[in-house]
Structures are given as structure tokens and as C-alpha cells.
Image: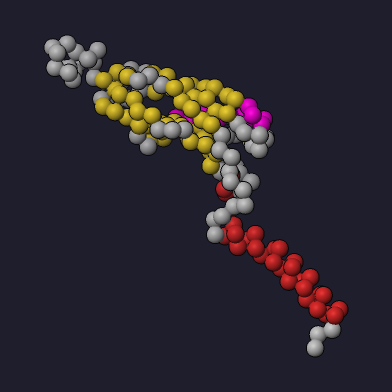
Amino acid sequence: MINLKNRNLLIIILLVLTTIFHPLSTSAQGKTKETPNIPNTTIKLPVNASIDKEFDINVIYQNVPSYSGNKGLVATLLIDNTELDHYTFGNLKPNDRIEFNFTSKISESGDHKVKVRILWPKPSSENRRYVSESEEYIIKVLDPMSDSDGDGLTDQ
């Protein structure tokens, strides 16, 4: 029979092991204790653009209170899931709101998917790497010489 002193020591050891290994097993399964607080990223762009004509994409990123001291966040412009341009932030404080522009042009007519992804290249943990991604927006690029509605006038 285990005496009372040895039983208490065994209980303490089991509690310590449970405390140490339970969080490790949770993170190994890809689960986190808290839901990430995803900041808002919105973009504004023209509804229509012309082939090979530059247009601006205005981006607004709103930091959240838990992301204090994020240094070197990288915003990437994606058009049709292809990374085209990057913008690097300085040190952001909680709740900082930053507005910036990408300038781009597209060489093919039609509908194109545009979005902005924000990553933290040097996170304290891998689940903090992904910071935000905007909704996907559609921009219609027109060929100025085409007549898509058949009215005898060019689209331009």
C-alpha cells in the first residue's frame, strides 16, 4: 500500500505532467486556446479599368488591440491569385489604422479577382503568421477597342 506522503507526491507529479503535456498535444493538433482576432482589411478599387492603363487600389488596414508591436507586416497585392506587389509596414501599435495604395495594370480584358493578404514574416508562433486577408473583389478590365455590347461604339 502506498503511504500518504508518496501518494501526494504521485498526484503532484501527475498534475505537473498534465499541465505540461496537455498544451503541447493541443498545439500539435493545430488547435489554439483562443480564437485569433483578425483585423479588418478593406480595399477600394475602380469597378472598370482599361487594358494596360494604371489604376490605384486603396487599402485600409486596421490593427487590433492584441497585435501590439507588430513590426514589418507585409501586405501583398494578389490579382488572379498571383502576387504582384508588396508593401511593408513599420511598427504598428494596437488599433493603428493605416491607409496605402498599390498601383497596378492588367494586360488582359475580362473579370479579374483582386485581394490583399497581410502576413507577419517573423511571428512569435506559426499561428500568428497569418494576420489578415481582404475579401475578394472583381475588377472588369475593358479593351478600349472592343465593342462588347454590339452598339457600334467602342467600350471606351
> What colouring method underlies this structural image?
secondary structure
Q: Is residue 92 magenta?
A: yes
**Left or right of 56, for residue 15:** right
* Residue 67 percent across, percent down from the top left: 64, 37
- On the question of residue 107 being in view, the answer is no
Which residue corresponds to the image point at 17% horizontal and 11% vertical from the top-left?
153
* Residue 32 percent across, percent down from the top left: 59, 52
Q: In terms of depth relative to the viewer, which is nearer, 98 or 73?
A: 98
* Residue 148 percent across, percent down from the top left: 18, 20
**Left or right of 104, for residue 64:** right
- Residue that extends furthest to the right in the rendered view of this protein: 5
Which residue corresponds to the image point at 47% horizontal and 21% vertical from the top-left?
58
Which residue corresponds to the image point at 52% horizontal and 25% vertical from the top-left?
60
Q: In terms of depth relative to the viewer, which is nearer, 4 or 45?
A: 4
Callout count: 0
- On the question of residue 80 being in view, the answer is yes
Q: Which residues are magenta?
A: 85-96
91 relative to 124, above or below: above
**Left or right of 124, for residue 99:** left
- Residue that extends furthest to the top in the rendered view of this protein: 153
93 relative to 33, above or below: above
Residue 112, by quadrant, is top left
Residue 19, by quadrant, is bottom right
63 relative to 100, above or below: below
Q: In which quadrant is the N terminus drawn?
A: bottom right
Q: Is residue 86 magenta?
A: yes
Q: In which quadrant is the C terminus drawn?
A: top left
Which residue corresponds to the image point at 14% horizontal and 13% vertical from the top-left?
151
* Residue 83 percent across, percent down from the top left: 41, 35
